Image: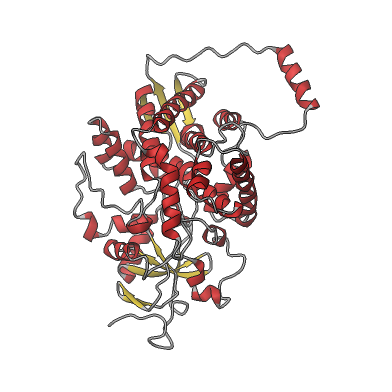
Amino acid sequence: MERVSGGYTPDVTLESLPTEPLLGREYQDRPEVVHERLRGRHGAVAPVDLLGVPVWLVLGYPEALHVLQNDAMWPKGMEHWRARNEGRVPDDWPVAPALVAENMMARGGPDHAEYRAAWDAALKPFQDPGHPQTRRLKDNIRRTAKDLVTLLAQGGRSGMADLAAQFSRPLPLMVAGELLGAPGSLDDEALMDIWRILDAGPASAQASERVLTAMGRLGEEKRRRPGEDFPSYMLAARPNLTASELAHELIMLMGMIADHGGILIANAVVEIITGDGRARASLSAGMIREAVNHVALRKPPLSNFVPRFPVTDQRLGQYIIRAGEPVWIATAATHTDVRFATGTSAHRATSTRAHLSWGAGPRQCPARELATTITTLALECLFEHFEHLELAVPVDRLPWRSSPFVRGLLALPIRYQLNAGFEIPAAPVPDRRAAEKRAADEERRPAQATTLRQFLTSLVTGTIDPNSF
């Protein structure tokens, strides 16, 4: 018997269906168990409760592909959400700040193609293999990665470390700073606020306001003094961008590069160490980019895409979805759909690129090449300089973030052994007089934000608690 939602029968609506809370400890630690239970009960599409709000979760690969490739029939944009328009979504819903952002990822409407063209133009100098800026960026990634390993190695040639706080998070932050044209003065708090927004925590609304203000200041600076950076190229491609519009796009870039990039690096290390062998086989064969592709398939950083809203009532899976009901695509779940997974092999060095980790259709991630490059160079550095890496805790005890959007680690405790040939520079002998002079100078100067490099050093050395935000 066909299951229906919405106007087909008066007593069956998305709101009236029993829903299982999506975000909980089980989903945080073992989302695959939740996905399979929902698949067994509902098939390819399931009604779930997302922090008190009912939504549809797409678990089936063909169904997800259909939605992603039909942007006109399944558009983005909160203006399409019927329940929200009717006042049935709380004003303080913690997921809302990420969805109301007026950036290319969340925006609906006919002007998406123009924004996408501006994004492609602004990213091209950093993704085109033949462009000198791409080469400079790659050199800087390699240099920064080695610097981070050197900082980590100050604790000894072997030992324990938090690879998330000390490597996989700081590296993409440095890249994001360079892309934004603010490698030495980006506000530390803005970096932390990106995580607060994506984790939909209680302070997400305040974090959104702060980071929007910070990106607005940066955007206005680039309008006055353009450089060879992403915001300047965005303004050149779309000069009529308002300060607010540019700020929203810069926040999106920070999310994609700084957060998703760090997640992909950490997830890659976990998959190579503990996975089913595919990523490890690719790495052993010298195909690092292919290893990254395996990780994107097995452990995609973006666990659930920004919702779509059908413009008319549509059948999806075993349900009829009513116009204006929110449809979220569970990326990792679609990759375990038997209709997709049967085409993959557990022990091949190469794999399909038909996965949905970067999206599909006209809204496929514009920075996927850059994210792959950052992760590839990070892994290249790690496995060049470390003779041995292993988890310091059982894989089922790794601490995962609780987020409706991303699948990322709070920490990645590892045991390591550096290669014998890796040289650790001697730590400088502390100069007490110089330190006292610097302290006196600081007292005479107004307080300023630390540089990004100082921030990263604080993360690596533990001065800043990486779990405090």
Looking at the image, residue 249 lies above or below residue 182: below
Query: Going by the image, does 63 lie left or right of 186?
Result: left
* Residue at image location 30% in from the left, 65% down from the top: 66
User: Is any atom of residue 362 visible in this view?
Assistant: yes
| 52 versus 454 height, above or below | below
Residue at the right extreme of this rendering: 444
What residue is at 35 percent from the left and 34 percent from the top?
Answer: 376
Q: What x and y, as percent, mark residue 149?
A: 46, 25
* 335 and 67: which is toward the camera: 67
> Is any part of residue 267 visible from this angle?
no
Screen quadrant of the N terminus: bottom left
Q: How is the image coloured?
A: secondary structure
**Quarter occupied by the C terminus:** top right
Q: Is residue 93 left or right of residue 137?
A: right
Q: Nearer the viewer, residue 114 or 142?
A: 114
Q: Position of residue 285 (x, y in %)?
A: 22, 31
Q: Residue at x 37, y 65 (%)?
A: 71
Closer to the camera, 74 or 39?
74
Left or right of 361 in this view: 444? right
**Residue 171 % position (x, y):** 48, 33
Residue at image point 32% right, 40% down? 292
Q: How many marks?
A: 0
Residue 156: x percent and y percent?
A: 48, 19
Q: Nearer the viewer, residue 20 or 126?
A: 126
